[in-house]
Amino acid sequence: MTRQPNRQPQKAVGTPQSRVDGRLKVTGQATYAADHDVTGVAYGVMVDATVGRGRITGVDTRAALDQPGVRAVLHHGNAPRLPYVDNPGSNNPPGERLRVFQDDRVRFFGQPVAVVVADTLEAAQHAASLVTVTYAAEPPSTDLTTAPADEPQRYARGDAEAAWAAAPVKLDLAFRFSRNHHNPMEPHATIARWEGDTLTLWDKTQWVVGGTQQELASVFGIPQQSVRVISPFVGGAFGSGLRAWPHVTVAALAARVTGRPVKLVLSRRQLYFGTGHRPAYTYALKLGSDRRGRLAASIQDIRAETSSYETFTEAVMGPGHMMYRTPNVRQAYATVPLDVNTPIWMRGPGYATGAHVVECAMDELAHELGVDPIELRLRNEPETDESSGLPFSSRRLRECLATGAREFGWHRRNPAPRSTRDGDWLVGTGMAAAVYDFGRAPAQAHARINADGTALVQAATSDMGPGTYTSMPQVAADALGLTMTTVEFRLGDSLMPPTPPHGGSMTMASVGSAVQDACDKVRRQAITLAVNDARSPLHRVNPDDVVVRDGRMHVKNDPTRGETYRQLLGRNQRDHLEVIGSWGPPEQSRYSMHAFGAVFTEVAVDDRLGLVRVRRMLGVYDAGRIINPKLADSQALGGMVGGIGQALLEHTVTDARDGRIVNANLADYLVPVNADIPDLRAIYLDGGNDQNADPIGVKGLGEVVIVGVAAAITNAVFHATGRRIRELPITAEALL
Amino acid sequence: MNGERRTVTVDNRTSLLDLVREHFGLTGTKKGCDAGACGACTVLVDGHRVNGCLTLAVRLDGAEVITIEGLSRDELHPLQQAFIDQDAFQCGFCTPGQIMSGVGCIRERHTGSASEIREWMSGNICRCGCYVKIVKAVQQAAKGR
Ligand code: FES
Ligand code: FES
């Protein structure tokens, strides 16, 4: 890396700061999308299709319109036509996006077919139940295993078939994954208001500019600047907010037609049809090795559901071709269009699925060979990323494994399955490695030093929970030579400089680097102003010799010689100094960039009832530099909780007759509750600072922390019971 | 309502949750499911924690209701402070409900052990997965009692 000669001391970065927005959140003052107080707001409630495929033959709105307070009922028969201009550069997958109320076609159960707008929520909800829609229904296609697939994506190196045939040790395994729903606690919500041709949206989104602003501008065929998106708080999303779903358009359409601002909040049930999901998969793996466990061949056939109108894909092939040294690999990844709404990335996208297969298979192979599962992984540790030929920017998986084994007490384990009993419970331990190909993308940030010596930094990014509000000012405070109390960071408004999606573990690397660039530049501007100012004590000092501490610029080796930002700006009658900074990754990367981890867990399985309880869990991560250890710890523990859900509970169930999701609520789609979660522990490897990845040395940690959790649990269930479960979630039925 | 007498005429379909959010503009109380399954809407009614989404407003003639906005004035309630200290939230959406539920849990003296707290705080889902720290925050506040 190129070190800046006047590199600032790092005082805030790396310290366990409490959340800057903590007070707002614990007092109920944080304003999520549906909390904004917009004058004259009316309420929109959507009506959804009750068939899985077909045509709408009639919409009877009379009873709804008769209700007091109902302003309008919109549907394909009376809604204005919308241009739906293409939106390249968005997260819309290839295909044709769903065009709300533009035709009579029903593409999946739960598709929005009408919206009621009324003066009160009660009236809108009741009237929505009175809208009668009739259909010419067709049988929907809902079976991933039998429906015809698209032409697969392929990857190959070496001759996998020949190497597999020749391998002395062979595994032939078939895995299945259920559809999962993000289920953030905050339902998706939009308040839409038109003033002339300008649209303001208070929206739950993970991508203020590229997601909501550009998409709504293209749907309505209006300039991007005519749409303003405001989203200061996001109540969790985990991927579900990475594109603007149909309801955002419905809210804007309803506001346009009624001339009122319209607030539209999806019901919990509607989230299952209206906002995407982690797709269901089948994943067949043939793995061949020599007798020492050195991998020779890996053959993978992957099928994943998508919708009939868009082809959603994710990085599910990654772990299967880069994680371990394997000379011969062949992969085929086919999407299977079904009558379902389009999937979207969910925490650890692709990797939470692909790495599960790889890590369970490694455990099976270790058992087959009588080798310790950690040792097997060490024997297959690659020198470089064999899929790209590139060196890893950093890969400290060995340290993760060693630290985890020591802290967990792995070596006390008796490797024989069913070897430990505690009353009715069979006890087992398991481990898995974790990996995630973290994203990086161009970002901008605005930094301003005010006349009073404080600073304001802004970027149109989001904070769905990781702590962007806190980590960004940590970076900014150090770069500006200020403290956490003298730097304010704002986000979540399309008027601010654009940033990439708040997802894919790319916010800290991308936006953080842009924040640092902006702050470095504006600090530089202040120093330049001082050294050129005859009245400054810093006059004629080499700018490279000036550092800033607590808002005071001084000569590095002579702290007595200097002055504050405030003095400088006051004397020069400057109201502020400001800069827009930016950062973007190089077009051609010289490195393969991944975060790594190792997960260890102990589970207990009731021998007769098949219940699985997680007793403890440890994760060790190589995630580069950790900006805020307090918040990073919470994120890791949260990832483990998500992984426990994926492993043992989460399962979207479809009725094949009509495509209806039968458990579209939080009582039947189970997610972990407090009583499901034991003590969890996370360790970040010391000294992480991946300068090959980005200027602030972070690798992103929001995704890697869910990867491998389900595999560690699955492997522990095998150790406890001797049963290999190759389907997620692991249910009691599967263990009986 | 939060120490103030309020007289309102409400639709008989209005839930306590919709009353506070949409009619009183007290949006600190959240709607996560509107069906009693998540606890985001937890408030105190006559000192007991209840799901605002399952309580019809018309039932509450003469009742005392405390929402997150009424829990503290200038100084934070010890449990609010404990949530910040322990980092017992991420997105913050479940947090008002967790805190009101935690206040109830402490009052009910269901804080004898971590596993007792886990059990009695299991009506409040946190999808960000902050459970370990929610337990620590409740322990911290219960200790200071
Ligand atoms: S909103 Fe009341 S329990 Fe979920
Ligand atoms: S903090 Fe996000 S749901 Fe609890």
Image (spheres, coloured by chain):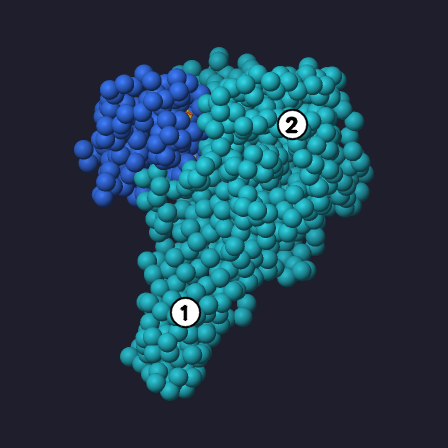
Question: Residue at label 2?
Answer: A75
Disc 1 versus disc 2: nearer the observer: 2
Residue A404 in the figure: left or right of residue A116:
left
Tell me residue B38's x, y (percent).
42, 25
Q: Which quadrant holds the C terminus of chain B?
A: top left
Specify whether disc 1 shares its chain with disc 2. yes
Q: Which quadrant holds the N terminus of chain B?
A: top left
Question: Residue at label 1?
Answer: A576
Chain at numbered mark 2: A
Q: Hey, what amino acid is under mark 2?
A: His
Q: Colour of chain A?
A: cyan
Q: Hey, what amino acid is under mark 1?
A: His
Which of the 4 quarters of the picture holds residue A532? bottom left
Does A151 appear above or below A77? Answer: below
Residue A389 can be seen in this image:
yes
Foreground residue among A176 and B72:
B72
Residue A374 in the figure: left or right of residue B10:
right
Residue A648 in the figure: left or right of residue B5:
right
Q: Quadrant of ligand 1?
A: top left
Residue lying at 29% horizontally and 19% vertically, measured from the top left: B60
Foreground residue among A298 and A168:
A298
Residue lying at 54% horizontally and 49% vertically, measured from the top left: A228
Chain coloured blue here: B
Query: What SS does tag 1 mark?
Result: strand
